[in-house]
Amino acid sequence: MKTKAPVAKNERLDVTIADLTYQGMGVAKVDDFPLFIENALPGEELTIQVTKVQSHYGFARAITWKTESPDRVKDVDKTYRQTGIAPLQHLAYPAQLKFKQHQIAELFSKDHQDVEVAPTLGMDNPTQYRNKAQVPVRMIKGQLETGFYRQHSHELIPLTDFYIQDPAIDAAIVKVRDILRQFEIPAYNEINDKGVIRNIMVRRGYYSHEMMIVLISRTQKMPSQAQLVDQIHQALPEVTSIVLNVNAKKTNVIMGNVTRTLYGKPTIEDSLLGLTFAISARSFYQVNPQQTEKLYQMAIDKAGLTGKETVIDAYCGIGTISLALAKHAKQVYGVDIVPEAIEDAKVNAQKNHLSNVTFEVDKAETQMAKWQEAGLKPDVVVVDPPRKGLAESLIDATAKMAPKKVVYVSCNPATLVRDVARFQELGYAIDGPIQPVDQFPQTPHVESVTVLVKK
């Protein structure tokens, strides 16, 4: 029998916000029926208007506040919320750190697991931290604009200050935008699949200050390409690499498969934990270098290496964790599904004069099964999977290899809880508190490090 929701669309109600969702929206309950409200914080009393009603939950918008949370930040730019760039900017930073700690603890307790979660490691300056930007380019009123999409839409909001990005990157985007306007290069139009420039990507080394500009184009060549490139590198002295990426498909995927270097080198260099890394246009590199150093140092410390161990790094990318581990281990094996990432990883091992690392291209779960079949016996396995977490076959292969420790670096608490439960069924237990690290201040995302030991 279908129960009727206790609220109706457009109805106005007075509510008290009970909690925040993992996306950072306020939650109010009406007869146990949850309503999700943007820009509302726990403890606040407000009048809301219901905007959408589903069978088990609804959405509403805040109309007037009767009381405000002491954790509310005044004078925020609503553009950053509308675009989803900084959905938590209205929440004071110490409260953001508590929210992230609570988010992990809450998910474990819902799964009937009693775990300790340490306070979140935060940043001194929780803004201007991103070392990489990918911004869409569109024509608005006949003029080429850069900015960000309004959430859940493809409507571009022009922006020049992205708040959580390195200001040098913001300034570079404006200069590139102006040069594109000067050469009258048309922006991509996704409705008729015409135009040229789709996105501008900028990467900047936090320590090296080397900068890469990637022009993502629908066409194989940019109009006035040589002059355009010349203007960009004159306008931006930090630029050591200008790259063209061709994406001719009608798709939401940002980058295509063809990448050509138009100026300088195909990579920029930066350092992390005292190691040097070459970073190409398409390789994955953590966007918050200051916090990544804390996160990886934490993973290395928790692995407890003495120099005698064999370590596997599943999802190794360009070798950032693998090479940091290699300085403290006897032998490290890394695997990643992206061939370019493994090419970069091998180059990075040579750059850092580390010969005790072996890299393979494959799905992590497939390679783990191969290593297990071949009788590889790691002492420690480090996993840093994407948001979807670990494949069950990877967990099974790991448990069969019986490492003393598994160090799990997670970017999604929900899949972490699921995967930990699976490890526990196979004879592993959580050792010590889970350590959250704030890699993405002003957003609801949280990274964490969990150690599992063989019972």
Image (cartoon, grey):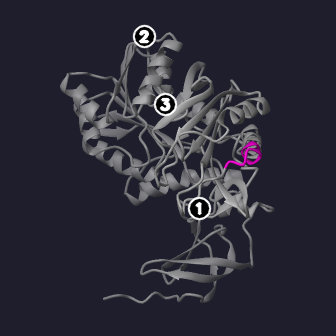
Q: Considering the image in quadrants, where does the C terminus appear?
A: top left
- Residue holding disc 2: 355
Measured Cα–Cα span from mark 2 to mark 3: 21 Å
- Residue holding disc 1: 24
Q: Residues within 10 Å of mark 2 (few under 14, many from 20)?
A: few
Q: Considering the image in quadrants, where does the N terminus appear?
A: bottom left
Question: Which marked residue is nearer to the observer: mark 1 or mark 2?
Answer: 2
Residue 419 counted in the magenta span: no
Measured Cα–Cα span from mark 3 to mark 1: 27 Å
Residue 39 rendering spot, x and y as whole percentages? 66, 68
Which circle's residue, 1 or 2, is located before the other in the chain? Answer: 1
- Bounds of the magenta segment: 179-185
Q: Amino acid at mark 2?
A: Ser
Of residues 400 and 340, the one drawn nearer to the viewer in this rendering: 340
- Residue holding disc 3: 299
Q: Residues within 10 Å of mark 3 (few under 14, many from 20)?
A: many
User: Which element type, helix, strand or loop, lies under badge 3?
Assistant: helix
